[in-house]
Image (spheres, grey):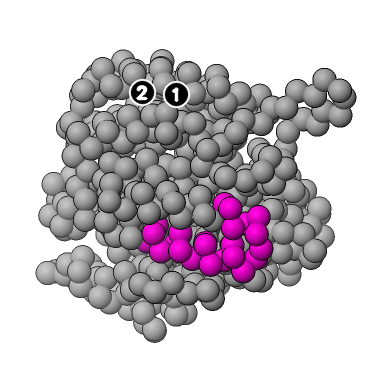
Amino acid sequence: MVPSQQVFGRMKRGAMRGISTLVRPLVAALRSGVRAPFLAGMACLALAFVALGASLVLRPAPVRAEAEGGAGTLRAHMGVASCAGSTCHGRSVASGTPVRQDELLRWQEESAPTGAHSRAWRVIGEPRGQAIARRLGLDSAGLVRECAGCHASAGAAKLADGVDCEACHGAAGAGPGGGWLAPHYTVGTSHARNVAQGMTDLTSPRVRAGVCLDCHLSGDGQGQFIAHRIMAAGHPRIAFELDLFSTLQQHHDEDADYAARKGHKTNAMQMWAIGQAEAVKRGLALYSQPAKANDGVFPEFTFYDCHSCHRRIYDGEEANVSAVPNPGRPIHAGMPPYNDENIILLLAAARVAAPAEAATFDARSKAFHRAMGAGRGEAVAAAQALRQAADALSARFAATAFSRDQAFAVIDAIASDAISARFTDYAGSVQSVMALDTLLGGMVNAGMVSAGGAGGLRMQINQAYAAVRDPNGFQPIAFRRALGGAVRAIRSLR
């Protein structure tokens, strides 16, 4: 799924940033209110897992965000009404200080992606949701069991509220981990104090990713794992890009007051890089769990690259093999590969921001692909080693400011021969275009590149989006040419 509807002019934390016109499924789904991991971020913070210990373990690692990510004991749930007062977040216009105070209105916006969370449960009752339920054989209890984990908020008494305030910001009521609702609007409070009293620190990219990935990639909670059978029933395929999805759901202004309260403004380049690392970690953690590895006698296909299997079949003597060899996947042609879209982009970021760790990550990713052809035990061990390397990169990125030169270097790395040769399938190619858009927009927001200069490159970026418009018509070589053209255009701003 790729961002659809060219929104060049999309406001990205106060600055212009385009998504694209091309590839309709994402925005259509956003508007319908689908929240579950389908564009893995699209309704959790738009449309975002997890610290790994230093030692390599063969047992499945926990998926829930640890330490920094805040883990989930059940908290008292207050509901949307607790935030909806006219002196809080329920104004009809953005006239408040220090926050907008129209956040509830934006959360409910019917015509924009920002309202996707409020529509998340409603979409279950719409034609597509009902068709999926019929194919899965779900009754009303089954819908709650299988869908409420992502299309509603844990602990909420009112499912119709969909993904409400507390789903992302943390349960506000008294109880384990909660109790920040009243103190957070008192005179003299601070963001640090709110976090200490149970509010989720969404200013931390690693924490934000942990929250969003639960429903936009998959999680451990009830009804939060998007298995292949669910996608086969009609659920959108999953993909994740933390910064882009955060932008689509943003309901606050990152002005001087925001920076003073939070301690900093968002660094889009850093958010993107950490999002890639946390997505890799989450996928590998889930893959390592025995209960999620198989569906009956079959492997759980949700972990594999869809495009590698969903190709035309040629049985004749003049077979026209459409698969393109991928140097990052040392596997034989008949083996379905693990979906490595985030692995590819994480390597590009690592080569620039953490070159010492990049070689280790690259070697471990290839070892993981090889191990999947050896056996389950070998694959899990390799997955844990790769997850450990991704966690090291996530921590490294969290301490990296991502300068102008680094942002341009990452864009160059994405189009380099070493990385672009790995764009053999649809999912990774989509990620690369979203990355260019995010990195360029991040430089605009940071004042590193002018909005006018970036705006002049929309044609080339849209050509790259056009090359991934249709998954059934995807051509790797043609895509690489379009990607190279976009990168050359961006490079001209340097």
Residue marked by disc 2 = 487
Residue 336 x, y percent position in the rendering: 68, 46
Q: Is residue 251 visible?
A: no
Magenta span:
369-391
Q: Is residue 322 visible?
A: yes
Q: Is residue 179 above or below residue 466?
A: below
Quarter holding the C terminus? top left
**At 25% across and 70% down in the image, what residue appears?**
194
Would you call the spot at circle 2 few (<14 residues within 10 Å), some (14-19), or many (20 or more)? many
Q: Is residue 407 magenta?
A: no
Q: Residue extending furthest right?
A: 316
| Quadrant in which residue 191 is drawn | bottom left
Is 337 in front, or is 475?
A: 337
The Cα atoms of the two marked residues, 1 and 2, are separated by: 6 Å
Helix, strand or loop under label 1? helix
Residue 314 x, y percent position in the rendering: 82, 28
Q: Pointer 1 and pointer 2: residues touching (CB < 8 Å)?
A: yes
Give the residue type at disc 2: Val
Prevailing secondary structure class for the magenta stretch in the rendered image: helix
Residue marked by disc 1 = 483
Helix, strand or loop under label 2? helix
Give the residue type at disc 1: Leu
Is 474 in front, or is 33?
A: 474
**At 62% across and 30% down in the image, what residue appears?**
324
- Please indicate whether residue 311 sits to the left or right of residue 258 in the image: right
Q: Is residue 46 above or below residue 186?
A: above
Quarter holding the N terminus? top right
